[in-house]
Image (cartoon, helix red, strand yellow):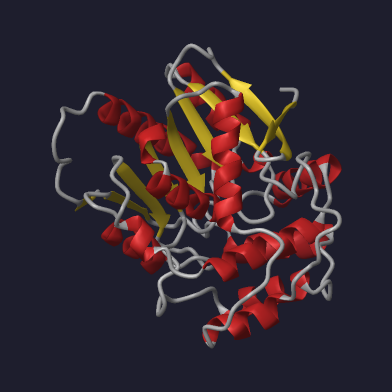
């Protein structure tokens, strides 16, 4: 695929599209510091083969989208401290800004309504968009994300320390350190070979290397706080997918997300961590397409009661 570009919310975004533009659209929103490559191409083509127009894009400040070069790089440790004390925080941009980027992308591509799928931070962006602009979405799928509610378990101390060091520039994301980090947060039951993981990371580095964007993304997450009130406003049919072995965003976060979204359906995977492992892609595609189809053909009225699959 070759990237295309558009201007959304005053920001130049890079995107790729799969399938017939005349088909119902699925918009894929990726997570913290991760390029559109985080959505495996095989997953995108599989979704397109099911009769969808699939769009994946680089969030602002990452990949080939516009970099916020003149924005300061906040210190994650300081923001975490202010967050615990409920003190105001100054960040270059917010998750709401990034949700508005998503809406601008839909406008630029002339997509009036879409099925929305977000992973990790992309799930948080999706939560905000689905709550504020629900009339623009046919369904919502939140993968390995969180409500941000106080009291939820966070990443392990080891993972948190690595993330903070990266945001401060104390631990440069080399190939070796990146492989080690992904081993910590990846799916323990679906670990790729060293060579496969190496090539995946190198492909990302060769396409774009912008650690400052990672730090600003992390700042936007910390500053956003709890989205519980917003989640209660989501009225589109929602599916929540989470791994039971997620070391970055523990499974309790996914359970809590589904609990606060009216009539959300929850699907948990054994052995899944904080990634989209190749062996589970067919299951993800099946869940997303069935959810989208069901939402598109749902009768008017209340959605089925919440349930865990």
- Residue occupying the point 62% across, 30% down: 41
Question: Which residue is rendered at x = 78% and y = 39% of the image?
Answer: 64
**Can you give x and y, in whole percent of width and height, for residue 255 in the image?**
32, 62
Q: Residue at x 60, y 32 (%)?
A: 105
* Quarter holding residue 250: bottom left
Residue at the bottom extreme of this rendering: 85
Q: Position of residue 186 (x, y in %)?
A: 57, 58
Whether residue 137 appears in this view of the structure is no
The x and y percentages for residue 120 are: 53, 55
Residue 57 location (% of width, % of height):
64, 36
Q: Quadrant of residue 78?
A: bottom right
Tally the marks: 0
Q: In the image, is residue 297 above or below residue 266? A: above
Which residue corresponds to the image point at 49% horizontal and 65% vertical from the top-left? Answer: 249
178 above or below 54? below
The one of 280 and 216 positioned closer to us in this rendering: 216
| Picture quadrant where residue 216 is located | bottom right
**Can residue 233 be seen?**
yes
189 or 156, nearer to the observer: 156
In this image, 93 relative to 207: left or right? Answer: left
Q: Does 231 sit above or below residue 202?
A: below
């Amino acid at each position: 695929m070759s990237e295309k570009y558009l201007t959304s919310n005053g920001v130049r975004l890079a995107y790729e599209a799969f399938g017939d533009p005349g088909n119902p659209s699925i918009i894929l929103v990726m997570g913290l510091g991760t390029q559109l490559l985080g959505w495996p191409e095989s997953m995108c083509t599989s979704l397109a083969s099911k009769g969808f127009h699939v769009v994946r894009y680089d969030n602002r400040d990452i990949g080939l989208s516009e970099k916020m070069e003149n924005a300061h790089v906040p210190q994650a440790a300081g923001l975490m401290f202010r967050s615990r004390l409920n003190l105001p925080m100054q960040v270059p941009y917010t998750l709401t800004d990034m949700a508005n980027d998503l809406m601008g992308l839909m406008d630029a591509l002339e997509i009036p309504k879409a099925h929305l799928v977000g992973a990790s931070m992309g799930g948080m962006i999706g939560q905000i968009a689905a709550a504020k602009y629900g009339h623009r979405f046919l369904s919502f799928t939140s993968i390995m994300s969180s409500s941000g509610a106080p009291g939820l378990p966070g990443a392990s101390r080891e993972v948190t320390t690595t993330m903070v060091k990266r945001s401060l520039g104390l631990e440069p994301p080399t190939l070796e350190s990146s492989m080690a980090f992904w081993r910590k947060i990846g799916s323990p039951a679906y670990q790729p070979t060293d060579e496969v993981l190496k090539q995946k990371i190198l492909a990302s580095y060769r396409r774009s290397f912008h650690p400052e964007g990672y730090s600003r993304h992390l700042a936007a997450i910390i500053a956003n706080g709890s989205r519980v009130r917003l989640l209660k406003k989501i009225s589109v049919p929602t599916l929540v997918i989470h791994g039971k072995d997620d070391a970055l965003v523990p499974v309790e976060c996914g359970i809590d997300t589904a609990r606060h979204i009216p009539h959300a359906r929850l699907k948990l995977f054994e052995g899944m961590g904080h990634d989209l492992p190749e062996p589970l892609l067919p299951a993800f595609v099946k869940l997303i397409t069935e959810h989208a189809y069901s939402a598109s053909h749902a009768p008017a009225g209340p959605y089925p009661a919440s349930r865990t699959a």
